[in-house]
Each structure stands twice: as structure tokens, then as C-alpha cells.
């Protein structure tokens, strides 16, 4: 028996990731990074929905189905519009009734 579920649309995944980021950044990032993010976000900030990587097992120790999760990155972009300073990578379950997420914070 397979259970069908509605995938998160990119905007919803971005909203969830950004809300969690704002709530948890102070506890998980270096104070200098929090300050940098706050000062630079208006000019260089980005929250991007990206293709779900298949190497999350290496990061979180659990094998995941990339089709069952959305991935969102939060960081700052450079002059070439490339995200070169990533503060957090989010893995968010598409299952609304069992919404789990994992975060890799900048070290």
C-alpha cells in the first residue's frame, strides 16, 4: 500500500524554512554570523528552493527518499548572484500530517 501525499510547493517550503531559521538561528549560529546575516540580508540575502540532494544520509545519519523531502538553503549571494555564504540547509518533509525537518547549520 502506497500513501500518496501532496508535495510542498516551493513558496511554502521557503516560508517554513525561513520561519524556523528566524526562530533557531540565535541558538545555532555564531553571534557574528547572526549579525552578518541581519546586516546583509536586505541587500544580499537569499532563500532558495533547490533540488533535494541525495547525500543527506552523510549529514543526518538517516537514509531518506529525496522525493519525500524539499530542500531549502538560506544564505547570502555574491556579486554573481551565487549563494556563497550558506547559513542553513533545510530538509523538510512533504507530509503535512507528519512534518519533520532537519537543518545543517553553518559551522
Image (spheres, helix red, strand yellow):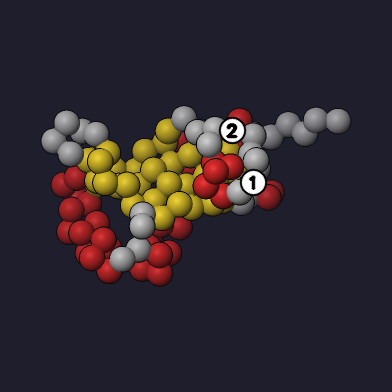
| Farthest residue, direction left | 79
User: Dot 2: within a 10 Å radius of its alpha carbon, few (fewer than 14), some, or many (20 or more) residues?
Assistant: some
Side of 52 where 85 appears, left or right: left
Rendered location of residue 8, percent (x, y): 55, 37
* Helix, strand or loop under label 2: helix
Q: Nearer the viewer, residue 48 or 9?
A: 48
Vertical position of residue 106 compared to residue 5: above or below: below
| Residue at 52% in and 47% down | 59
Whether the residues at callouts 2 and 1 have beta carbons within 8 Å, the answer is no
| Residue at 43% in and 41% down | 72
Side of 38 where 2 appears, left or right: right
Rendered location of residue 54, percent (x, y): 54, 33
User: Dot 1: within a 10 Å radius of its alpha carbon, few (fewer than 14), some, or many (20 or more) residues?
Assistant: few
Marks 2 and 1 sit apart, C-alpha to C-alpha, by: 12 Å
Rendered location of residue 80, percent (x, y): 17, 31
Vertical position of residue 78 compared to residue 31: above or below: above
Q: Give the numbered dot on residue 51.
A: none
* Residue denoted by label 2: 66
Q: Nearer the viewer, residue 86 or 42?
A: 86
Residue 87 visible within the image: yes
| Farthest residue, direction right | 1
Rendered location of residue 78, percent (x, y): 18, 39
| Residue at 39% in and 43% down | 73
| Residue at 40% in and 69% down | 27
Residue 1 lies in quadrant: top right
* Helix, strand or loop under label 1: loop
* Residue denoted by label 1: 62
Vertical position of residue 29 compared to residue 98: above or below: below
Amino acid at each position: 500500500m502506497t500513501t500518496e501525499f501532496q508535495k510542498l510547493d516551493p513558496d511554502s517550503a521557503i516560508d517554513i524554512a525561513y520561519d524556523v531559521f528566524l526562530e533557531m538561528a540565535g541558538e545555532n549560529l555564531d553571534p557574528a554570523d547572526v549579525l552578518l546575516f541581519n546586516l546583509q540580508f536586505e541587500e544580499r540575502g537569499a532563500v532558495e528552493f533547490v533540488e533535494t540532494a541525495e547525500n543527506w544520509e552523510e549529514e543526518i545519519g538517516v537514509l531518506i527518499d529525496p522525493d519525500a523531502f524539499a530542500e531549502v538553503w538560506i544564505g547570502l549571494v555574491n556579486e554573481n548572484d551565487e549563494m556563497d555564504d550558506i547559513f542553513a540547509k533545510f530538509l523538510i518533509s512533504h507530509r503535512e500530517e507528519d512534518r519533520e525537518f532537519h537543518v545543517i547549520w553553518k559551522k
